[in-house]
Image (tube, grey):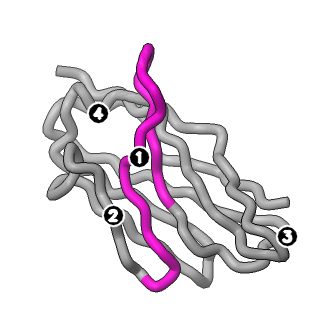
């Protein structure tokens, strides 16, 4: 079992920045893809950004150029640096990680609230 613990959410004014962190712990075999998703009220959960263990990244078009995903494979931690935040970025942000053991299991964090005021 892998536990994901997110931190770094909060309230920020439009144009501001926040940095989210997600630390994985527990019985980890090999974490490959890690990423961030978000869910705004009344909307479906959507991909924000992902990163492989080799550093290849993928971003939603709505955040490209403003958000940066990175990871520390030694610490099993993934980060999301969010700059130039907009009110439409307001959502609960969830961390996701895929653990490659005898089977691939996808884990989710509990979510952290990000609120951007106009």
Task: Give the mark, 3 or 1, whose residue is nearer the N terminus.
Answer: 3
Crowding around mark 1 (Cα neighbors within 10 Å: few <14, some 14 to 19, many 20+) is: some
**Label 2 to label 1: alpha-carbon separation:** 9 Å
Task: Give the mark, 2 or 3, whose residue is nearer the N terminus.
Answer: 3
**Which is nearer the eye, 61 or 71?**
61
Crowding around mark 2 (Cα neighbors within 10 Å: few <14, some 14 to 19, many 20+) is: some
- The residue carrying mark 1 is 47
Task: Give the mark, 3 or 4, whose residue is nearer the N terminus.
Answer: 3
Q: How many marks?
A: 4
Which quadrant of the figure has residue 115? top left
Residues marked 4 and 1 touching at CB (< 8 Å) = no
Tell me residue 47's x, y (percent). Answer: 41, 46
Tell me residue 44's x, y (percent). Answer: 46, 27
Magenta span includes 3: no
Residues marked 3 and 1 touching at CB (< 8 Å) = no
Task: Give the mark, 2 or 1, whose residue is nearer the N terminus.
Answer: 1
Task: Give the mark, 2 or 4, whose residue is nearer the N terminus.
Answer: 2
Mark nearer the viewer, 4 or 1: 1
- Which element is circle 3 on? loop
Which quadrant of the figure has residue 12? top left
Label at residue 27: 3
- The residue carrying mark 2 is 58
Crowding around mark 4 (Cα neighbors within 10 Å: few <14, some 14 to 19, many 20+) is: many
Which residue occupies 85% across, 60% down?
1
**Label 2 to label 3: alpha-carbon separation:** 27 Å
**Label 3 to label 1: alpha-carbon separation:** 25 Å
Mark nearer the viewer, 2 or 3: 2
- The residue carrying mark 4 is 89
**Label 2 to label 4: alpha-carbon separation:** 17 Å
Which quadrant of the figure has residue 41? top left
Residues marked 2 and 1 touching at CB (< 8 Å) = yes
**Label 3 to label 4: alpha-carbon separation:** 33 Å
């Amino acid at each position: 079992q892998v536990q994901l613990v997110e931190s770094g959410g909060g309230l920020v004014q439009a144009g501001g920045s926040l940095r989210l962190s997600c630390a994985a712990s527990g019985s980890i075999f090999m974490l490959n893809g890690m990423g961030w998703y978000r869910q705004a009220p009344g909307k479906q959960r959507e991909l924000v950004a992902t990163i492989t263990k080799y550093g290849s990244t993928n971003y939603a078009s709505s955040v490209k150029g403003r958000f940066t995903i990175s990871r520390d494979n030694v610490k099993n931690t993934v980060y999301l640096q969010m700059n130039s935040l907009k009110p439409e970025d307001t959502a609960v942000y969830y961390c996701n990680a895929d653990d490659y053991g005898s089977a691939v299991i996808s884990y989710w964090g509990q979510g952290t609230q990000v609120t951007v005021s106009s």
